[in-house]
Image: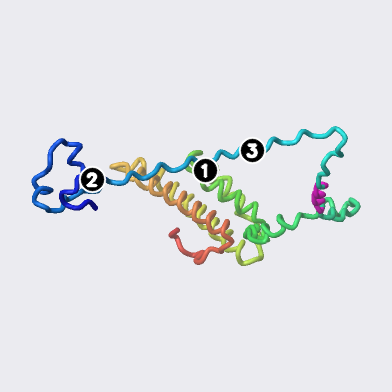
């Protein structure tokens, strides 16, 4: 550092300005603010050039490749054993059909004492109204003069049909006679008779189809 008032010192810049500062004349040291240092610029990274790929030599052997792995062979399940066709095997039901048939209800069989004839008589009773009593006369002739079935189920329906037809014949005769009476009393009698015959015939068919006998054959109600 230059001494005060030393113009020969290299740090004394008064001679560059052309005059001496008051601080140097008084012998005080001069404050010198150091200049900020400039950081040097980083050196550029060296560029590494990639080595050129060697040209393939025509006399070099080709590179060997790994052999591909063999694909797995699918396993085929064995074919089901086939039995020779026969007359019995053609009509045998399949297992699935047999299993489903067990869940079905067994059909209600007809009564053993002539179920089809009982159905026919009930059909004639139901057709009595549309035919104006003609089919009822035919049904009455079918149940009259022959013995009834022996089993309890069929016999109960046979007696039920006889009582229905005979009662209808008597009521129809009375209604026709009362048509000539005052106030035509035969008209309501014939109307109630037709309704009664249809209801009894439908009730009998329902019980016969369900395989149930008539609980009270002596009753005049349904």
Vertical relation: 159 (above or below) 194:
below
Residue ID for mark 2 = 8
Q: CA distance from mark 2 to mark 1?
A: 156 Å
- Identify which residue, 64 or 67, lies in the foreground: 64
Q: Which percent across, then down, holds residue 25?
A: 10, 48
Asked if the stretch drawn in magenta spans residue 181, the answer is no
Asked if the stretch drawn in magenta spans residue 73, the answer is yes
- Identify which residue, 95 or 58, lies in the foreground: 58
Residue ID for mark 1 = 127
Highlighted range, magenta: 67-75
The local secondary structure at tag 1 comes to loop
Horizontally, is 23 left or right of 118 in the view? left
- Identify which residue, 55 or 69, lies in the foreground: 55
The dot on residue 136 is none
Crowding at mark 3 (Cα within 10 Å: few <14, some 14-19, many 20+): few
Observer able to see residue 148: no
The local secondary structure at tag 3 comes to loop
The dot on residue 50 is 3
- Identify which residue, 85 or 78, lies in the foreground: 78
Q: Quadrant of residue 40?
A: top left
Q: Which percent across, then down, holds residue 161?
A: 54, 56
The local secondary structure at tag 2 comes to loop
Q: Which percent across, then down, holds residue 154?
A: 61, 61
């Amino acid at each position: 550092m230059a001494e005060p008032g030393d113009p020969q010192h290299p740090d004394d810049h008064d001679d560059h300005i052309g005059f001496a500062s008051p601080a140097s004349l008084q012998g005080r040291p001069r404050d010198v603010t150091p200049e900020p240092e400039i950081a040097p610029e980083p050196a550029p990274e060296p560029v590494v050039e990639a080595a050129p790929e060697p040209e393939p030599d025509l006399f070099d052997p080709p590179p060997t490749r790994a052999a591909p792995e063999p694909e797995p062979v699918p396993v085929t399940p064995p074919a089901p054993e086939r039995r020779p066709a026969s007359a019995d095997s053609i009509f045998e039901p399949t297992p699935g059909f047999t299993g489903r048939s067990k869940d079905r209800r067994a059909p209600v069989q007809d009564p053993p004492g002539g179920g089809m004839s009982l159905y026919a008589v009930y059909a004639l009773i139901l057709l009595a109204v549309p035919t104006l009593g003609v089919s009822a006369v035919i049904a009455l002739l079918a149940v009259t003069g022959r013995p009834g079935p022996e089993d309890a189920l069929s016999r109960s329906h046979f007696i039920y049909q006889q009582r229905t037809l005979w009662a209808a014949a008597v009521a129809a005769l009375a209604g026709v006679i009362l048509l000539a009476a005052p106030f035509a009393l035969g008209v309501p009698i014939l109307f109630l008779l037709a309704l009664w015959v249809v209801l009894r015939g439908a009730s009998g068919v329902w019980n016969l189809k369900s395989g149930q006998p008539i609980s009270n054959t002596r009753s005049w109600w349904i």
